[in-house]
Amino acid sequence: MAQSTIYDETYIVGEVERVIFLSEQTRFTVLKVLIGETNTHFSDEVIVTGYFHAIAEGETYRFTGKITSHARFGEQFSAETFKKEQPTTVRGVIQYLSGETFPGIGEKTAKKIVETLGVEALGKIADDRTVLRGIEGLSAKKQEMIHNRILENSQTERLVIKLTEYGFGARMSAKIMKTYQDQALHVIEKDPYRLVMDIEGVGFQTADRIAYSAGIARNDETRLQAGIMYIMEGVVMSEGHTYMDYATLVELTGDLLNHDGQEYFTQKDIGATIDALSDNDKLVQYEDRIYIPSLFYSEYKSSEQIYRMINNRTDVAVSEEKAGEVIGEVGEKFDIHYNAKQKSAMIAALTEKISIITGGPGTGKTTIVKGIIRAYHELHDLKDHDEYDKDEYPIRLVAPTGRASKRLSETAGIPASTIHRMIGWGMDTEKDEMIDAEIDADLIIIDEMSMVDTWLFYQLMRNVKPYTSLVFVGDRDQLPSVGPGTVFKDLIESEIIPVTELDTIYRQGEGSSIIRLAHEIKEQRKMDITQKFKDRLFIPAKVNQIPELVDNVVNKAVSKGYDMRDIQVLAPIYKGNAGILKLNQILQSILNPEDEGKNEIAFGDVIFREGDKVIQLVNRAEDNIFNGDSGVIDSILFKDQDEAEKDSILVDYDGIHIAYERKELTELAHAYCTSIHKAQGSEYPIVIMPVVRSYRHMLMKNIVYTGITRAKESLILCGDPDAFYESLEKEGIERRTSLYEMIRLLFGRTPEEKPAEPGEIPEVLSEETMFTIPAMINMGGVTPYDFI
């Protein structure tokens, strides 16, 4: 076979006229390039795509790669490598020196440099910065800047070549350079296992291969440390656990590191390194459990705060008799009959520091929340909400997502916000960052508690003041949080906090088959899912029939006057013929088809169009927009057509308008079809939910339950009935958490024992019972707050 040469490469050399799209997260870039030289059939200009660390408009690059065909945009050039081309003409060098790479250097100064140094100016400057000293009007600072920028560009090219030799593609090379900057090569060659910890997408095996080629021994201690942390992050975090048991961690680490019949690390070695990582605060070891520090302290500190709130009261409690009397008055005033469980839940909310209300759909949770607010007003002689200045109203309503908080506000009749906004958790907040934002409120009601993860719960609890009362509301049978932990479940099962479980169906009336189906699933009763009802239907279909079926159902709904805000398709996976990505394409073509009167903008393989339904993917606390919020694209502006400074999209989130530049479009996705997790906390008039065997690894009882309970008026299930029945037999992974046990231990009870009454004093003082003794014992009601 003949050896390939450089002349076999497919290449394009040209000037980048425009950066059409750039993802800050992945560095995926779409460029419009004016062709100067190529061995392809392209002429004049071409669209170039790839993963680039640094690309500047107006500069010339050599791209190598291959020609690809896009279904919508035709032929493009997919670059696998790129290299900045030094300009070779006088005009080219002047344009380069007066471009964005050299701020403060205008065309006039650039001309002087070229007139003095000639067309080889860039090489001369790189070799010797002093050649610039004779240029009139060029300060020493600017001389230094020009020299450094030219060297930096040269170093970047060398680094890209080296990363390619190590097997990294353009995409991963860009991420590595963004993370480590000029230290990238040093990290890779001297400490490659850092890549596993720092850069998402670099697997342990990749770092292991680099380390081996760099001469790092298989039994090197840094390899063992990286292996342990890789297992902790990968297994614990991906499955929602808050810890891993010691023996399992040792076993999985050994399986990862010892192979080819070689035992590089014994169990004793692994155990010793786990101990060392714990001593250095990289891990936390408690009995036979190993924790990532942020998760351990989030669970433990949350437990302590719960203990303090319940046992160290600083206010005068409302009696149950008084609360019951006021609840009766509220019921009469608003013509509402509260049943025994509803009254019990309301009394607990008004008399306890912390209480819990859980129940399935239609069981009256919203009615109770409104009743609690009304009774609290009566008990504490509050004015109407509108009569208070901002942040002075003593009741706060919150939920984990913007959509859930909006729904809570609409049903309760007073403003609500996300938990993130209340505590100041923004898009740049790290999971282990401590937020200090004391919440000034007498009563906080938190809805959709099953969605709250361990980190968010701790940030909430650490900012609650001692005199505040908390009411946690949710459905224990819904999906657990996306993040680690099962906070709501642990709080309920601790048996320390008063819990009211509602089981009488009210919403939509006893005749709602959707509500009835939810309770049949919850109570594990037999059902015939193919039975037809006026508000529910199951359409048998094979996976390849799902797109057409969804197309038909949505078209019929539109013909009856429904629009895209009313219709929500839910699916548990993104890829495949019945996945979220495919279904979004179909739904966009029906609900918001291409129209000459609507602007649209390309983002990779996705087309965003004016009128599109979209979902926010990250928190923007400063804009009061959060992960999971959905809106509609109001307008799309182009800098060369609309006198805008940059291409941008304006999204309307129920009256809040947020602008996105091209580089920020990674924050958006189409929302015609979303994951069931993303829909949690929301309700829609019509829900369409495919249930097919290709989903089987994601189909579980709580996923199906959560999906069907999003429907208010109509539920259309489609797919394989057997896949539906099988999903109800799968409970999913049982998350390993410690919040439940930590709460009980602080109250002096083991997980197996009955809970102590709040304030019960242990007979014997020990390490286990020391935290169960009230801090203000024998203080006659005096507290530190009396001295503030």
Image (cartoon, rainbow, N blue to C red):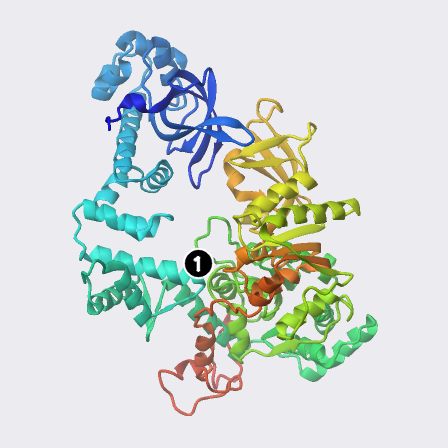
Q: Looking at the image, which residue is at 53% across and 86% down?
A: 757
Q: Position of residue 456 (x, y in %)?
A: 50, 61
Judge by depth and name the residue closer to the eye, 282 or 11: 11
Position of 331 with respect to 645 (left or right) is: right
35 horizontally vs 562: left or right: left
**Residue 786 appears in the picture as rendered:** no
Secondary element under disc 1, as helix, strand or loop, is: loop
* Picture layout, residue 363 above or below residue 574: below
The local crowd at label 1, few if under 14, some if 14 to 19, many if 20 or more residues have their Cα within 10 Å, is: few
Identify the residue at image location x=42%, y=37%. 27
Question: Seen from this angle, which residue lies furthest front?
Answer: 1
484, 146: nearer the viewer = 484
Where is residue 591 drawn, in percent x and y?
69, 41
The outermost residue toward the top is 115
Side (left or right) of 305 relative to 83: right
In the rendered image, which residue does mark 1 sit on? Answer: 434
Farthest-out residue, bottom: 763
Q: In this view, does 705 lie above or below 75?
A: below
The residue shown at (25%, 36%) is 165
Taking 582 as reference, is 688 above or below it? Answer: below
Q: Where is residue 267 in the image (x, y as percent from the top left)?
A: 22, 69
| Residue 645 visible, this orientation | yes
Residue, x 56% and y 27% (percent of image)?
645
Residue 35: name its quadrant.
Answer: top left
The N terminus lies in which quarter of the figure?
top left
> How many callouts does the rendering have?
1
Residue 95 position within the rendered picture, expressed as x and y whole percent measured from the top left: 39, 15
Given the image, on which type of amino acid does mark 1 rest? Met
